[in-house]
Image: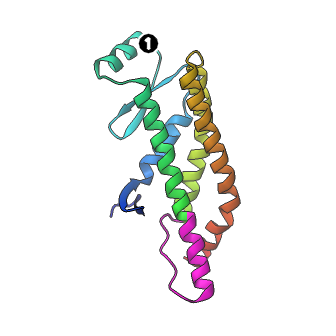
Amino acid sequence: MRQGVVAMQQKNSSFCVNVDALVVNLKIVASLHPFEKLSVSGDFLICCEPSYATSVRRWWYGETRQQTLDAVADIVDAATRVLAASWSAASASTIASGARTSAPLPPLLTPTQARHLLSALDQSRGGIANLATTYAADPKTFYMLDALHARISDFVADGAARAPLLAIKAADT
């Protein structure tokens, strides 16, 4: 498997997540300024200056605001799932190795990858707040972004509480 790609198993399905792409996309979101918009190009987000040409291009390619917001939410969801799964594996590994009942589980992310991903997720809150400013006149979009911002804040706060698990895992590896 390529470096930076994590395979996960979740409720009868497995999927691969490119952690590096998640970090890049979250940093792109973090770099947004008020009144800048996002567009999706392949697996990556793109910052767009508000202009008539941008609006025409988005219309021409059939891009909608909802599709872009869904892409941002999918990126945040993937990042939180990977981090949560990694923390669960680190916790289970620590318990298993302490109880000497089984071999430690392999980590989904290295401690460095987990820190980078959590940091990018934390930084993305600023860009999401700026995106909410951009769409303040659209209540549905504004509140969707507000809810996403709150979800990230809660997750990052939980992540700070789980940081000792990452330190334990780093000492084990």
**Closest to the observer, 41 or 12:** 12
Q: Is residue 20 above or below residue 100?
A: above
Judge whether 6 appears above or below 124 on screen.
below
Q: Residues within 10 Å of mark 1 (few under 14, many from 20)?
A: few
> Quarter-wise, where is residue 111 in the image?
bottom right
For residue 99: magenta? yes
Q: Residue furthest bottom?
A: 100
Viewer-side residue, 120 vs 106: 106
Task: Please name the residue that numbered disc 1 is placed on.
Answer: 51
Of the pair 16 and 147, the residue shown nearer to us? 147
Q: Is residue 43 within the magenta segment?
A: no
The magenta span reads: 87-110
Residue 29: x and y in percent read: 52, 35
Q: Which of the image's four quarters has the N terminus?
A: bottom left
Q: Nearer the viewer, residue 128 or 138?
A: 138
User: Across the whole image, how many numbered discs are drawn on residues?
Assistant: 1
- Which residue lies at the image location 36% right of the left edge and 60% below the top edge? 14
Q: For numbered disc 1, what is the local secondary structure?
A: loop
Q: With 55 as the anchor, is 112 left or right in this view?
A: right
Q: Quadrant of residue 167?
A: bottom right
Provide residue 83's location: percent of width, then percent of height. 54, 57
